[in-house]
Amino acid sequence: MKNAHLIAWALSHPWAMMPERMAAYAGVLASHTAGALPAAAPAADANAAAAPARQSSARAGNIAVVNVFGSIVEWPGDIDVCDGGTSTRVVGQQLTDAENDETVSQVLMVFNSPGGSVYGTSELGDVINRVKASKPVIGVAQSLAASAAYWMLAQCSEAYCAPGGEVGSIGVYSGYQNIAKAMAMAGVDIQLFSAGKYKTEMSPFGEGLTPEAVAYQEQRAQDYYAMFTKAVAKGRNVPIDSVRNGMGQGRVLGADAALEAGMIDGVMPVDQVIRKMQRNAKAARAPGRSAQANRNEIDLLSI
């Protein structure tokens, strides 16, 4: 049971992640636990492995690139849960570094993530909103920004998706597994000693969840869902009802459908987004031109 603690860790978290991807991760964990697969070496955070890329220039106008790849967790130490991923703490620091760097005029966030833990996601959304108040933060799904990743993408100044990509999966869930009968069949008798009325209501060794415990867990999911939809509504500048009653309602949408639903601002791959940002910076520096003329040129170059 070398990795049993990882399964318990995963079940105890509220997740803003595609359930089908979580099921795949659970299968990998189960295989590790059963000894069918060799334990994977802890994966390095994709963001810690590479410093933000920039255009080669010492003057103002550089683009800082921040990657959000794999499953999302709050702390770097949590990343080896399954297949590597991204720490919201690391991403937040990278965004802050870009904010404070006078040579950086824009930030590009590149997403390829099924989502992850709710923990740390809201706080990172606040960082994105703070940074974009002084510098454009452009986000692109190349090719997946689901659940917690879309939570972040929706906070960007502009949001894009690659033509073959997907965004969405707006929702929250958690899980519960009771193993009391399995332990009894194995001849193991577990007794719990606790203080606090509800301290052990989620224990996997008890008699299962009471109706009161179920109601509490469902309310927790609704509370996190309210945070999620409020953040998306603010980021996309739409009413909360538009988020709850549209935008896939928990499903991921392809790029064209997401654009029609107002979840993104355009459909283009990351290299095209970078060219657009470079043209934007060049147009902004052009002397003697109005802001409207600059915007018109950017629109034409983006077609």
Image (tube, rainbow, N blue to C red):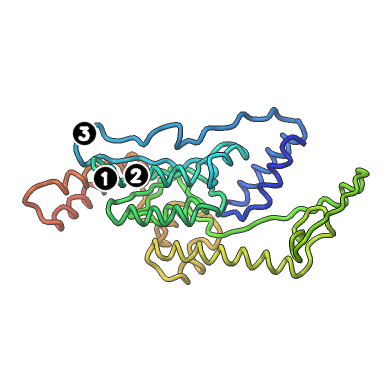
**Separation of marks 1 and 3 at Cα, in angstroms:** 17 Å
Tag 2: amino acid: Leu
Which residue, given by chain and number where applicable, does mark 2 sit on? 108
| Disc 3: CA contacts within 10 A as few (<14), some (14-19) or many (>=20) | few
Image check: 186 left or right of 61?
right
Image check: 192 left or right of 224?
right
In the displayed structure, would residue 56 be above or below residue 299? above
In the displayed structure, would residue 157 be above or below residue 48? below
The secondary structure type at the circle numbered 3 is: loop
| Disc 2: CA contacts within 10 A as few (<14), some (14-19) or many (>=20) | many
Q: Position of residue 19 (x, y in %)?
A: 62, 52
Q: Position of residue 290 (x, y in %)?
A: 11, 56
Q: Position of residue 171 (x, y in %)?
A: 56, 60
Q: Nearer the viewer, mark 2 or mark 1?
A: 2
Q: Nearer the viewer, mark 1 or mark 3?
A: 3
Q: Position of residue 145 (x, y in %)?
A: 47, 49
**Separation of marks 2 and 1 at Cα, in angstroms:** 9 Å
Image check: 26 left or right of 284?
right
Which residue, given by chain and number where applicable, does mark 1 sit on? 277
The secondary structure type at the circle numbered 1 is: helix
Give yes or no for contact between labels 2 and 1 (Cβ–Cβ under 8 Å).
yes
Quadrant (top left, top right, bottom left, bottom right) of the N terminus: top right
Tag 3: amino acid: Ala
> Which residue lies at the image location 43% right of the left edge and 65% below the top edge?
233
Q: Report the front residue among 47 and 35.
A: 47
> Which residue lies at the image location 51% right of the left edge and 61% below the top edge?
248
Q: Which mark is residue 122?
A: none
The secondary structure type at the circle numbered 2 is: strand
Tag 1: amino acid: Met
Total residue callouts? 3
Which residue, given by chain and number where applicable, does mark 3 sit on? 58
